[in-house]
Structures are given as C-alpha cells and as structure tokens.
Image: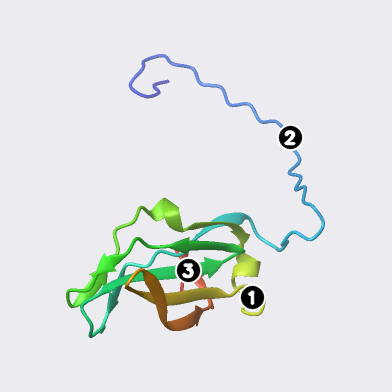
Amino acid sequence: GDFASLQRATMAIEGRPYANISISRDGEARGGGALKRLTVYPIRVSGLGAVARYRVRIAANGQVAETSPEANWGSVDFKDHISVFDLGPIPKSILMNTTATKILVTLLQLQAGSEVSLGKGEVTCSSVLNGECQ
C-alpha cells in the first residue's frame, strides 16, 4: 500500500502493556484527574480614575505571581509573558473545589516607592470548558 506518498511502504504498529503509577509525598494535594498547569493571566484593569502605576498580584496553589507595573491611561494593559503566571500543576478536582482552591487577586497602586492595596478579590472555578475556568 501507500503511506505518506511512499509507494509500496510498509508500516508496523507495536503495542506494549504499561502501568501508570503516581507517586506522591504525604501532605501533597491529591485528587482525581490528571495534573494540569494552573495559569492565571491578568490582561486588563479598567475603571481606575487616577493616572498612576498599577500592579496585579495573583496568589494560588501555594504560589504568587505579579505583573510588572504599568501606567493607567484609561485602562491598564499588562504585557508580561504568560509563563510568569504559571502557578504549578493542579488536579482538576482540586481546582474546582472552592474550599480547597482559592485564587486571590489583589490590585496594587504604586505611590512614592510603596504599594497601596486598592482591593482584593477571590476567583473560583465552577467548571472547565476547553481548558479554561468558567
């Protein structure tokens, strides 16, 4: 037969049995489902009155990530690389457990070398569609 535009080609497929084993330490988060990377990426903050510099802090899965400070010109658009907001692996079942997983978002305004918290919020994941929390 033909395969990948090669005439008289022969292809062989071999199957081998395997065992999938997960090893974890005591105290580590465990739950059903495969581990996926938790990435919480802040894109834009709008509705801020003062022309100043702002930063967003994300805390989840035992890790913290922050945006670079950006100026407000009507809205604040963050341009940091998405890898900065990779907050580690987490099972889907743990991600969707609102008592076990808290995604904390803090908006900070930078003033004279210090940061002032303008507000905090908590994000939860009630469902996952195409790899995104809804």
Image quadrant containing the N terminus: top left
Give the x, y percent position of residue 45: 30, 76
| Element at label 1 | loop
Q: Residue furthest left?
A: 73
Q: Please tell me which of labels 3 and 1 falls first in the chain.
A: 3
The residue where tag 1 is placed is 97
Q: Amino acid at mark 2?
A: Pro
Q: Quadrant of residue 50?
A: bottom left
Residue 100: which quarter of the image?
A: bottom right
When asked about the image quadrant of residue 99, the answer is bottom right
Residue 15 against residue 53 in the figure, above or below: above
Real-space CA distance between mark 3 and mark 1, rounded to the nearest whole angstrom:
18 Å
The residue positioned 79% from the left and 52% from the top of the image is 25
Cα distance in 3D space between marks 2 and 3: 42 Å
Left or right side of 27 for 72: left
Q: How crowded is the residue under tag 3: few (<14 C-alpha within 10 Å), some, or many (20+)?
A: many
